Amino acid sequence: MPLRNAIETHARQSPDALAVCISGRRLTYSELYDKIMRLHGALSKLPSRTRPNLPLPSSGRLLAFSGGNHPTATIALATALAGPHAVELLDPKWPDAMHRQTLAKLPPDAIFCLTSQTALIDAARRLKVPAIRVDTDDFEGFLATPAPLPFPSPSDLFQVGFTSGTTSQPKAFARTRHSWRVSLDASRMAFALTPQSHTFAPGPLAHGISMYAFAETLDLGATFFGTPQFDLATAHRAMSEARRIVAVPTFLTALSRGEKQEQIHEITTAGAKLDPSLLSQAQTHFPNARIHEYYGASELGFISLNTHGPHSSSAPAHSVGHPFAHVALSIRKNGVEVPQGFPGTIFVHGDLAIEGYIWGGRNSGFRREGPWATVGDIGQLNTDGSLSILGREGGMVITSGHNVYPQEIENALVNIPGIESAVVLGVSHPSRGQEIIAILKTDVALPEIRARLALGLPHYKLPRQFFSIKTWPLTSSGKIAHVELKKWLKQKDARLAPLTT
């Protein structure tokens, strides 16, 4: 059923059940539904803007939210999920120029922000957009008398999201209600979710994995736990009431420390492949939890899933699992499907892919071929039907005439005991065209690394240079920032220490 119906049903049947808790700010389902209707009432009174690239129903408004994980974020997001409105999620870590550029391209009907975001408030004022400071009394003052929620259409847009991968320039896309309705039905079964799946998501709500976890939790009638900013002590307090964690691997690494968390029964992770050491660490720290590792993209939704139990996994460890039930895969090269076991571009057929970007999609890798869509990832289907990721179109390294996919080498590296994580890059070389460079978090000696790699990889795939790193540079979504690493290599930054012994 639509999220509007789900939230209203939970508010009527379990009014005192806890819906949201962020930093001690708790809202029951009845309180949350009242806030949704009051925010809907206030938004409906605002004059609407004409946006040819973002059509909304006559009763719908576009609200922008840049307040990070401030507790009011859950009210704004829930209002977009349940009402006729759409939410434009701005990352508070963006530089001021990026905020101004985004607002100019897609002015909202109202923006909800923090008092400290003065440049954003000034930009909104110039665009004649009301700026509501959520860390003051502005937010409560903006809310109006509760107004009944209309029934949105499945084809209505409800979210403007931004994706940049490992680059710094965001690309804007829009999601329909139908696409997430299909997702919610699929993930409920795949992740074994129940009304008791009280979920802790430590990441920013402006990013897809946390926002989706919030929607999942409200759909179930469970409780969503978050933190304004991540720190381990606050996270442990939030986890104490949760039974499930949804986090990218970088956050899961931080959470897998300290005392064992036996109350956690399910973990969902995405954004990067789990390396064996992190998987083992998480299984030890969360001994009662199944770990659902899925592969997907903001533009495509869920693609494949590998579930790890205490003693076995649903697919080979080197893979990203089998396709979700609603997904069909096609591996293609030059427009032609390749046989099983051969590499090619991964195309997805399902109900979750976006139609295209609102802006910024040039050279992004996303494209459609009829009902099939891709973001340009390279992979292969294994003999058991599971999917392995090899890299990204344009990310292939050509060295001495050989085509090499960095992901294959990264997989071999992290399977060496003692290597915590690895990134493989190609850099220009005068005679080879490109040279393969490996950057590692490890204490393993270089001769042992070289010897173990040589057991499974041909000579031309072996990195020529190795560097160690203490802390990875990260994008705002918690992924390793490859662009920054390439810059450090070029500048011979001291944060990259050459491995010579």
Image: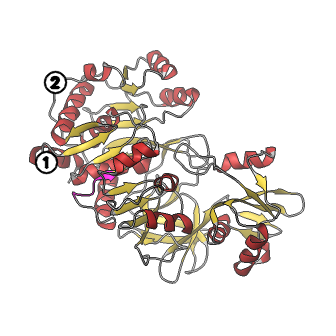
Inspect this view and state whether residue 174 appears. no
| Pointer 2 or 1: first along the chain | 1
Q: Amino acid at mark 2?
A: Thr
- The crowd level at tag 1 (other Cα within 10 Å; few <14, some 14-19, many 20+) is some
Identify the mark at residue 9; answer none if there is no mark: 1
Q: For residue 228, which quarter of the picture?
A: top left
Inspect this view and state whether residue 500 appears. yes
Q: Position of residue 325 (x, y in %)?
A: 35, 70
Name the quadrant of the C terminus. bottom right
Q: Is residue 338 magenta?
A: no
Q: Position of residue 223 (x, y in %)?
A: 26, 49
**Which residue lies most toward the left here?**
13
Range of residues picked out in magenta: 195-199
For this rendering, which residue is in front, 113 or 351?
A: 113
Q: Amino acid at mark 1?
A: Thr
Classify mark 2: helix, strand or loop: loop
For this rendering, which residue is in front, 14 or 365?
A: 14
Q: Residue at x 33, y 67 (%)?
A: 190
Q: Is residue 48 above or below residue 24?
A: above
Identify the mark at residue 145; answer none if there is no mark: 2
**Which residue lies most toward the right here?**
431
Q: Is residue 221 left or right of residue 124?
A: left
